[in-house]
Amino acid sequence: MTPRDAFLIDLAQWLLFGAFAAYLLAFLLYVSGTLGRRISGGSGFANTAGYGTVANVAGVVLHGLAILARWQGSGFWPTSNMYEFIGFMAFSSMLAFLVIHRMYRLYIVGALVTPVTLFLLAYSYVFPRDVTPLIPALQSIWLPLHVSLAALGEGFFAVAFGAALLYLLRVRGLELASRRAADEVASALEGGAVAAGAGGTASIARPAETADQRWERIWGVRLMEVLFYVILVMVGFTLLALIFRYAGFQWIFSANTNPYHLPPIIGPYGAEVGEKGSFLGIPLPAVVVPYGWKGKHLNTLLYSLAVGGLLYWVIRRFITRGRIGDALALRVGGDPELLDEISYRAVAIGYPIFTLGGLIFAMIWAKEAWGRYWFWDPKETWALIAWLVYSAYLHFRISRGWEGRKSAWLAVLGFGVVLFTLVGVNLLIVGLHSYAGGD
Amino acid sequence: MIIVAIAVASVLGTLIEQESLYQDWRPPYLYYPDRYGEFWGNLFMRLGLTHTFSSVWYAALILMLVISLIICSLHRLVPLHRMLVRPQVWKLPHFLRKQQIVLEAGCDLAEAEAMLRRSGYRIWRDRECIYAEKGRLSRYGPYVLHIGLLVVCFAAFAKALPGWDESQDVWIPDGQTVKVPGTDFAITNHQFTIELYENGMPSRFATDASILVDGEEVLRRTIEVNRPLSYGGWDIYQASWREEPGMAHLRLVHAETGQVVTTIPFDLRDPAPEFPVEGTNLKVAVRTYLHDFMLDPETGQPTNASYEVLNPVLMAEVVAADTEQVLGRIALVILGDTPAVYAGPYYLEVDRVDTRWYTALKLHQDKTVPYMYAGLAVVFIGMLMTFFIYHWQVWVRAENGGVLIGARAYKNRFGLNREIQRLFGKPQGEGTERYDTA
């Protein structure tokens, strides 16, 4: 369909590009502000983080204008397909960050939230950017209300995720630092003892390890690496999808399966092994999925896992030279208790907004459009699951006094569920919201 | 924890294709073994995982949640309420020093009281101690929320009560009226309209409809997607549409002269048995009419292949109106370009076939809706109370010529910190106590 005003649509693309550049700049400023200060060992980059927030404000303004331009250009609120929605979600995550930032003035949270925004914005480019006309069911005032509010709530969850991750890193960093200090003291003492010839009886009592710390040392650090791997898989997926979308490769199997844009290692149901020749000695496809499975998506997943693994290996081997989490942990700053509070506060603000937009408005709209308020459609069930996870978070926090690590891991899990609701459900499961799909 | 159990069960319910969602024409007992393999498919069906959200065990989980909500809420609400209504004002210095925010200030008790009162605190005083609080309402928020959730769960379960959640579909062709079973009204479809985008997707579809009671029109309105019509407890939704060949206009032609004798309107769904030809002594009598003609493979007899009007075939006779003498026989395939096969002086040909539009209306009568909405509203109010009001407590005790202040926040500890700092100066420390479990 030709949009109402092609110029405004183009303008929106350029504004969005500007917003992306501003966020990227902000990210670099935050990183140099936190890492740079550590490296230069003092006042070197004192104001950089502040400029990062300025850049983020500029980004949000440009992004907001882009949304308004697309709204005017297409004639409806731009949250109707995956491209528009993920972009809006990027916008709301940054908006939520700025709101939280106004309350707490802790720049470093931006160093973790801004990449989430950048990732979402980049991810939105994976989907087709055309203006899609609204089917009658979507022509409702509830479309902007339901989707925008849900996205705003999820934006706060993104901030909670950023703060929680930072908290986990920071606490780990403090522990590592204190352990190193203890080790140094111990080795100095031992060295002194040996030199003095007084026998090896000197031993330093390390501070006793709590069950919590023990869990963190054994499982927490590994879980953190898994988390970084998952993040890199998502980054890898986005890179692959963008590269191959613009490269324009296609492997077509039959009229009723979507064409592949990546070399088909896992073929769709009904294809034959090796029917597309071979690639580096691997027959294409090498495996064919059984009935009912989505070969194309599994194929993409396989590539993403591989690229994520490669990225992880490269970073771990050549950049951080050890666990990524530990390397970052030693370089981030911030008061852990404040970070914990910020994460909790972001959930506490996002939760009612998400409940209203993601569940209550969704139910009212479903009732109006289809006659029933709940369908157990996968997307809506996953929204409920996300809601349950955050309910558990708040419940454990308020009534069982869960603070700190346990709480932070739950906030990370919650945002993972949110991302799965937005992305995974569309890729792996379909349902009522499948109009919002792409491939 | 039951919340976690429900979350896990819901995850399973989306990873395994549900009976209501899979896109296959086969019934579950044929589909699932093929989809997941003989063993797993049958196992999933046995466990109810193929209809998780209507399974007994999922309902049992929700029921457990309801029970725990009631028990936990009462268990905590009663002591909490007692504590909030009659707070302990006189506290030992030891208690104050354990709070989240602790400081000593130089002012006296009366000044501290005045300052706290000005900032909107409610004050209790007992000897040398003051207890001040604000935002107490916040503490009731979770329980309000829980009550709302109970109503929501009730509404969800009430759907299973007979007559509480009913729905039916009616298909009405243009210009016709259909009595809705189980109700006292009928619906007329005056006209169904559909508009398309350039790419062929529908941009709008709507039914110009009337509600009739005892043949009298009581209401006329356009029903379209997102704009249902409510009448007599039923909500009437525009659900879908269908088109099929409707009225065929057939020309009766005299074979020798090629002259059109008459045109007969032939309803492909429900044709009249015979059509008298005006001004002549002729009539066209329908002998056999099949809306989807096929020959039964077993008996070799003509029969209908489906319920749809796909391949309508008419076998008619031209007879004299008075004597019933058969003048000719005609067989005609109405759709397509096949000419009629005939014996006698007349044949039939198709002038045009009008499309008949059906609107599909979905009727819902769901008595749980008001309860559900009320429950959701209460849930949301409870959330606002919980998250946007902060309960802050401050104890002040006269000590050493000044005052000792201990304060704690159930939410937004940093906000309280700022407020105390504004009132009394920088906090000097932090006690050991965190959130308590009330």
Image (cartoon, coloured by chain):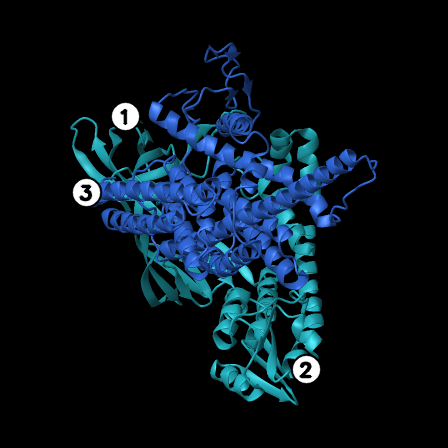
Chain colours: A blue, B cyan
| SS under mark 2 | loop
Q: Where is residue A409 drawn, in percent x and y?
A: 60, 48
Task: Please state the chain letter of the residue tagged with numbered disc 1 in the rendered image.
Answer: B
Which amino acid, by three-letter code, is at mark 1?
Pro
The residue that disc 2 covers is B88
Residue A7 is tagged as 3
Mark 2: amino acid: Gln
**Comparing marks 2 and 3, which lies closer to the viewer?**
2
- Secondary structure beneath disc 3? helix
Tell me how far mark 2 sits from mark 1, CA to CA.
100 Å
Quadrant of image for the C terminus of chain B: bottom right
**In screen coordinates, is B44 left or right of B286?**
right
Q: Position of residue B223 (x, y in %)?
A: 34, 58
Q: Nearer the viewer, residue B136 or B16?
A: B136
**What's the residue at 51%, 15% (across, down)?**
A272
Secondary element at tag 1: loop
Q: Which residue is mark 1?
A: B339
Tell me which chain the residue with mark 3 is part of: A
State the image coordinates of residue B272 (x, y, percent, origin top left).
35, 45
Q: Residues within 10 Å of mark 3 (few under 14, many from 20)?
A: few
* Residue that appears at 50% across and 33% down: A232
